Amino acid sequence: MRPNTKQILSAVDASEDQESEVIPAAYVVQASVQIAKTGTATGDVNLMVSNDEKDPTNWSEVATVALADAGVYLIPKTDLCYKWLKVQFVADNEEDGTLTVNLNTIGLN
């Protein structure tokens, strides 16, 4: 098993919806997501997955965390068996703030 940590969103605007890049996940068996939020913006961070063969368009939510106050939030370790993953932020308001999202995966390669 090999760990991998990657910053997938870096100080992005939390007043609007955001998405990370699409990450190939065929060899990922576990993932966790840590979110650092500043400001008063609120919304949900979703760990999304897809089993589309290529160029994924059909996404399902595996885990979510609601963001309220500024601080650090976590989507705990989640078992995965999917071809693709991404992280999505859905803003609830247009208040100010930023998001930084780190993805940690454990995989077979």
Image (cartoon, rainbow, N blue to C red):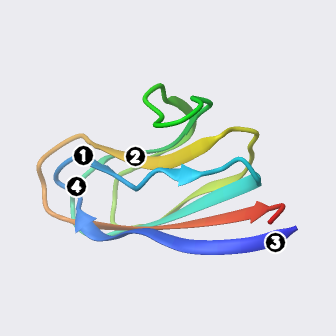
Image point 47% across, 25% down: which residue? 58
Q: Can you tell which of label 2 and label 3 is closer to the viewer?
A: 3
Relative to the observer, which residue lies in front, 50 or 67? 50
Q: Are marks 1 and 3 in contact (CB under 8 Å)?
A: no
Mark toward the start of the polypeptide (2 vs 3)? 3
For label 1, the residue is 17
Mark toward the start of the polypeptide (1 vs 2)? 1
How far apart in space, not on screen, are marks 4 and 1 (Cα)? 11 Å
How far apart in space, not on screen, are marks 2 and 3 (Cα)? 24 Å
Q: Give, as a three-letter code, the residue at label 4.
A: Ala
For label 3, the residue is 2
Q: Give, as a three-letter code, the residue at label 3.
A: Arg
Mark toward the start of the polypeptide (4 vs 1)? 1
For label 4, the residue is 41
Residue 59 screen position, x and y as percent: 49, 29
Q: Give, as a three-letter code, the residue at label 1.
A: Asp
For label 2, the residue is 88
